[in-house]
Image: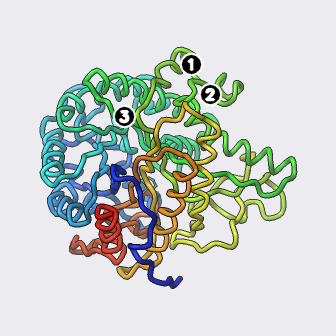
Amino acid sequence: MTTAPVSPLSLPRFPRDFLWGVSTSAAQTEGAVAEDGRGRSVWDVFAAEAGRIKDGSDARVATDHYHRYREDVGLLKELGAGAYRFSVAWPRVVPDGDGPVNAAGLDFYDRLVDALLAAGIAPVPTLFHWDTPQALEERGGWLVRETAERFAAYADVVAERLGDRVEHWITLNEPAEVTLLGYGLGQHAPGRQLLFEALPAAHHQLLGHGLAVQALRAHGATNIGIANSHGPTWRASASEADTEAADLYDLLLNRLFAEPVLLGRYPDEELAALLPGPVAEDLKVISQPLDRYGINYYQPTRVGAPGADGAGAADFGGIRLPPELPFAPREIEGYPRTDFGWPVVPQALTELLVTFRERYGDRLPPVVITENGCSYEGIEDGERIAFLDGHLRALHAAMESGVDVRGYFVWSLTDNFEWAEGYARRFGLVHVDYATLARTPKASYHWLRDVLREQARR
Ligand code: IFM
């Protein structure tokens, strides 16, 4: 795809105190998986199994952020980022998920936070971005309640160490993907294929979120959010069957993760009845007030009933759905696509935000877009510039129509380990040569730097 140059000067003006940031995660960037006492994560184990990662790679080195974080902080500073969302690797801090704390692991985040603050960048740690300690997985992982409790204990340890300097906290990243891809379909770690029996993993992550909020509050935290992945669900047609299928998909991927947090209830009673434990009591913990609601937005999804013409012809950006599910993906036509095959639909971000405001009203805290980005090859990445420009305009349109949005984080700072896709998908503003680990800012990095300068000047 070729794109015309988009001037950084032509974007509408965002509020002065708008938080401009960039997101990454530990498992995708840090590497150093066996250093300084880090324990094993489910992703270490999963990636070591033949056939799990499409290019046969793993994240033992990744972008070597663990050793090169100062260079990465330098890139953030030169970019003009106001905030850096990274994740803390649970197995680096509590190697077995339970038991002794690894002081050397905590020291790394201590150094990173100090380096960010010295560069004038707000640290935004995410406590869980998919790297469950393997030892906990062997005791049932997120399928069991104990993992939520261990997560809260770990949150307490991190808050104790970093809480004097960190203002913004995120508990979980995308519990929907962990549930669907990790426990439902087995395409991500821990590789379980439980279909609807994966639902306890959703409940226990949400409970872990609520318990972690309590732990963070006990340390005085005043800016806490969750990063949920959301996107509009478009029905394949107005037929009853397609409408039902799309509604179910929307319920499972959007409402199942938003409503316990925002409304204190599950969107469907039959579904809630499948969940383990004292669900009504747990929902009180899960729905404590948040200061921010993080949304990771990438694309809308078009869904219809299975079995009809065209059903199953599409996949969800590399994710294969088994035919026995009661919904099936359909192609979204008429839009450009990223190299990952994801449709580029900026206006769906406006639609999503307006829908959330209409659905949840004043139960929706101020929103932060905690991830948005695209995978393209090349350093002259005009397509990424067009993507970011389009999505920032769509975000601004939602704000103009009254949605309270306080920040926007690009996924991602550097190219990195894209889970089951390995290193084949490049989401970075900065190119990484995986043979030398050299970082080279792409055209989109320079463009965003100019956008941020221009926004700060106005
Ligand atoms: O790389 C991932 C990230 O870890 C979670 N959100 C989506 C990104 C792109 O697939």
Q: Is residue 209 above or below residue 320?
A: above
Residue 418 percent coordinates (x, y): 41, 60
Q: Given contact means CB atoms under 8 Å apart, are the residues at marks 3 and 2 in contact?
A: no
- At 47% from the left and 66% from the top, the residue drawn is 374
Q: Given contact means CB atoms under 8 Å apart, are the residues at marks 1 and 2 in contact?
A: yes
266 to the left or right of 138: right
Q: Which mark is residue 279?
A: 1
Q: Which mark is residue 224?
A: 3
Q: Which residue is mark 2?
A: 266
Residue 196 percent coordinates (x, y): 64, 37
- At 42% from the left and 28% from the top, the residue drawn is 208
The one of 153 and 293 positioned closer to us in this rendering: 293
> Dot 2 lies on which element?
loop
The one of 390 and 173 positioned closer to us in this rendering: 390
- At 46% from the left and 64% from the top, the residue drawn is 12
Question: In the picture, which quadrant includes the C terminus?
Answer: bottom left
